[in-house]
Image (cartoon, helix red, strand yellow):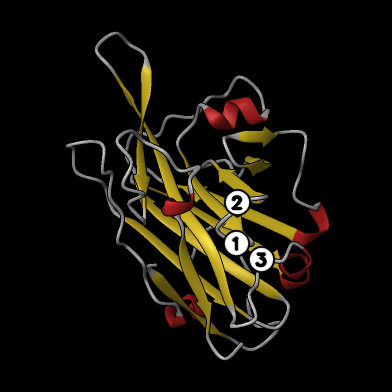
């Protein structure tokens, strides 16, 4: 499995504002190994970073995008589902029973849900509000998303293994306008799941986040 190293920082030294500009982000490894195995067009730059302290896992995305597509119908999960976004899936083991999905658009709106094998989705579920913080920002050329996830909740969901690893899928959906005027997504992933058609909801789409000195 692909592995990303999550460096440890001192507790209570990190804050997020949606701009990925806190000096501590310089201590994070930059992950930019993303591709779209099912499309021929090149993928614009995506930078993923993660850090953690005793209390919190911090995650950030910096995405190059000068043509954002945001469904502004309302603030429902469905509107997020029709918008450019980044995605973080977390699982307790390879059986995907269950796994937890966070899909976040440039407005910091989140589509959060639990899932089980064979695309059994529970959209009525929400990540505990006291255990997550989300901030975002966008410019003419980029959008940024930052997440702060409480370690206690990750532990309660059995998402941190004894060896300090978290099995995660890291994804992006980019909506492009077609000749007929409709918008269709290009699916972008860190780990190539080796599927014939785009598919993130499969065990082979996950890698590992390794918490250093856990």
Which residue corresponds to mark 2? 96
Task: Where is residue 69? Give x, y as percent.
Answer: 42, 29
Confirm whether residue 21 shows in the render.
no
Q: Along the polypeptide, which appears first: circle 3 or circle 2?
A: 2
In the image, is 42 to the left or to the right of 190? Answer: left
Foreground mark, 3 or 1, reads: 1
The location of residue 122, given as percent across then percent down, is 72, 35
Image spot of residue 113 (x, y percent) = 68, 41
Give above or below for 78 relative to 203: above
Residue with the mark numbered 3: 159
For residue 32, what is the image quadrant? bottom left
Q: Are marks 1 and 2 in contact (CB under 8 Å)?
A: yes
Q: Secondary structure at mark 1?
A: loop
Cα–Cα gap, marks 1 and 2: 6 Å
Q: Are marks 3 and 1 in contact (CB under 8 Å)?
A: no
Evaluate whether residue 175 shows in this view: yes
Residue nearest the viewer, comparing 90 with 63: 90
Q: Residue at x 43, y 52 (%)?
A: 205
Residue placed under numbered mark 1 in the picture:
93
The quadrant of the picture occupied by the N terminus is: bottom left
Between disc 3 and disc 2, the foreground one is: 2
Q: Is residue 172 left or right of residue 122?
A: left
The quarter of the image holding the C terminus is bottom right
- Look at 36% across and 56% down and name the residue there: 191
**The image quarter in which residue 157 lies:** bottom right
Please report contact status of discs 3 and 2: CB closer than 8 Å, yes or no: no
Question: Where residue 73 is drawn, which disc sits there?
Answer: none
Q: Position of residue 183 (x, y in %)?
A: 38, 20
How far apart are labels 3 and 1 at the CA level? 8 Å
């Amino acid at each position: 499995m692909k592995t990303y190293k999550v460096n440890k920082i001192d507790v209570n030294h990190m804050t997020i504002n949606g701009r990925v500009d806190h000096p501590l982000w310089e201590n994070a490894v930059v992950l930019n190994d993303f591709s779209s195995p099912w499309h021929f067009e090149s993928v614009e730059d995506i930078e993923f970073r993660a850090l953690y302290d005793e209390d919190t896992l911090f995650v950030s995305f910096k995405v190059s995008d000068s043509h954002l597509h945001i469904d502004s119908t309302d603030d429902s999960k469905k509107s997020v589902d029709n918008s450019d976004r980044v995605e973080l899936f977390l699982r307790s083991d390879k059986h995907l029973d269950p796994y937890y999905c966070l899909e976040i658009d440039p407005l910091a709106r989140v589509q959060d849900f639990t899932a089980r094998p064979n695309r059994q989705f529970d959209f009525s579920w929400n990540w505990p509000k006291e255990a997550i913080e989300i901030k975002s920002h966008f410019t003419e050329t980029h959008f940024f998303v930052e997440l702060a996830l409480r370690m206690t909740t990750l532990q309660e969901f059995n998402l941190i293994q004894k060896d300090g690893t978290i099995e995660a899928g890291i994804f992006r959906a980019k909506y492009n306008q077609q000749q007929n005027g409709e918008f269709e997504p290009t699916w972008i992933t860190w780990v190539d799941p080796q599927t014939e058609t785009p598919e993130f909801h499969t065990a082979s789409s996950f890698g590992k986040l390794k918490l250093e000195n856990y």
